[in-house]
Amino acid sequence: MEWAGSLDEYEKLVIRMNTPRVVIDNAVCATSTVVKVDSARKHGILLEAVQVLTDLNLSIKKAYISSDGRWFMDVFHVTDKNGDKLTDKNVIRYIEQSLGGFNSSRTDVFTGLTALELTGTDRPGLLSEVFAVLAELQCNVVEAKVWTHNGRIASLIFVKEVDSGSPIEDAQKISKIEGRLRNVLKGDNDIRGARTTVAMAITHTERRLHQMMFADRDYERKPLKESVVDSSLPCVTVQNWLERGYSIINVQCKDRRKLLFDIVCTLTDMQYVVFHATIKTRQDMAYLEFYIRHTDGTPISSEAERQRVTQCLEAAIERRASKGVKLELYTTDRQGLLSEVTRTFRENGLNVTRAEISTTGDKALNLFYVTDAAGNLVDSKTIEPVREKIGINNLVVKEEQLLGSQKGDESEQQSGIGGAMLFFLGGLVRKNLYNLGWIKSYS
């Protein structure tokens, strides 16, 4: 590091102490790249580190997190989307630069677009109605993300004027868009009301979606129609360690990308600080343990707070969980495309549970997760007519989560959950205590 001639030794020391140190090592582990981060501690710094890694679509297979006093130390074991070590020098350089200069004001880049935030009661065909209104009002959808959970929907939609390609700035038109969409979202049965706003700035799209659903209290609502018990639902436990002033959270669920981000994002926005954590994955399962305190330094203080933390973490994990068949639409973008596609879904009895809309130049790449109107898996007989109408080569089934494809795993998951949980609660707790120096052995 080169120093300006005007800096004295104390100023150099302060800079060193507040500049994160990042080491990326491909030699220490046979199956993953190890990313080590040492930094001065501040609220939200763990979320920033995890966000950098997950925005690159990396999988965090293992992690150890420790924050004592003023220092923050993380070790992440990560792989790329193919499950391999990181070898792309540009990706490695980006991680070093991003983690080496944390900036909590980092934003998603949607320059020249108008952001619409929508929350309300979910129902079959709702997304079709939303996109139909936007098409009618001459709004071109450039990017969008849609999540549904417990009968609620949250969406961030980035639009521009069809004719000029400029952001929508006319106050009367914005008011009209908000009013029309609010009426669509309210429907006939929304007893809690819908919310439609134009956002001036989005700090991070997926974090904002979590915040919107949290504010909408989706964690309190039950599914509209309950089907068979799903053994893949997350198991979250919360207990206090009063001697050390921590609350200990244990999570067991199916592993997936961005799982750690979803959990840490929720804890951070609920004003909790993670002091220590251990994350492990085994096959398709994830085992996570967090030692937390409130930002005022106190552990969870009541049964009501404990239940709320449990419900909020379960919701954070479930919101992004893939529900239904994953369909990928890649075609030339045009005005009204999304309205036509989602109308075809609705007319064929398909309901969109999650969506990611993106455009590059004149091409649209859209991902949809679909179920039947009752939220159940669909069979290929339902999917194929939709593909034929939209275009066999344009609409592709990316994940075969069709009716009858999951039965083989259920008994194995149910029979293994008890032993895995015992391993989790025993081994990880003992190892964490050993690392903290509070016991002499964890074997």
Image: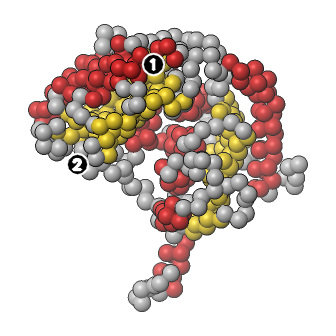
Amino acid on which the number 1 mark rests in the picture: Glu
Color theme of the render: secondary structure
Q: Position of residue 65 (x, y in %)?
A: 65, 54
Give the mark nearest the N terminus, 1 or 2.
Answer: 2
| Callout 2 secondary element | loop
Snapshot quadrant of residue 197: top left
Q: Which residue is mark 1?
A: 384
Q: Position of residue 263 (x, y in %)?
A: 56, 40
Amino acid on which the number 2 mark rests in the picture: Gly
Q: Does 401 appear above or below 61? A: above
Which residue is located at x 43 percent, y 32 percent? 328
Q: Which residue is mark 2?
A: 112
Which residue is located at x 11 percent, y 32 percent? 172
Question: Is 420 or 27 nearer to us in this picture?
Answer: 27
Q: CA distance from mark 1 to mark 2?
A: 38 Å
Which residue is located at x 51 percent, y 24 percent? 325
Crowd class of label 2 (few under 14; some 14 to 19; many from 20; radius 10 Å) = few
Q: Position of residue 294 (x, y in %)?
A: 56, 44
- Considering every residue shown, the one lying at the far bottom of the view is 5
One can see residue 243 in this view: yes
Q: Is residue 414 left or right of residue 53?
A: right
Q: Position of residue 70 (x, y in %)?
A: 59, 63
Question: Is 379 or 109 nearer to us in this picture?
Answer: 379
Question: Is 385 or 98 nearer to us in this picture?
Answer: 385
| Callout 1 secondary element | helix
Question: Is 16 or 208 nearer to us in this picture?
Answer: 208
One can see residue 222 in this view: no
Q: Does 88 appear above or below 82? A: below
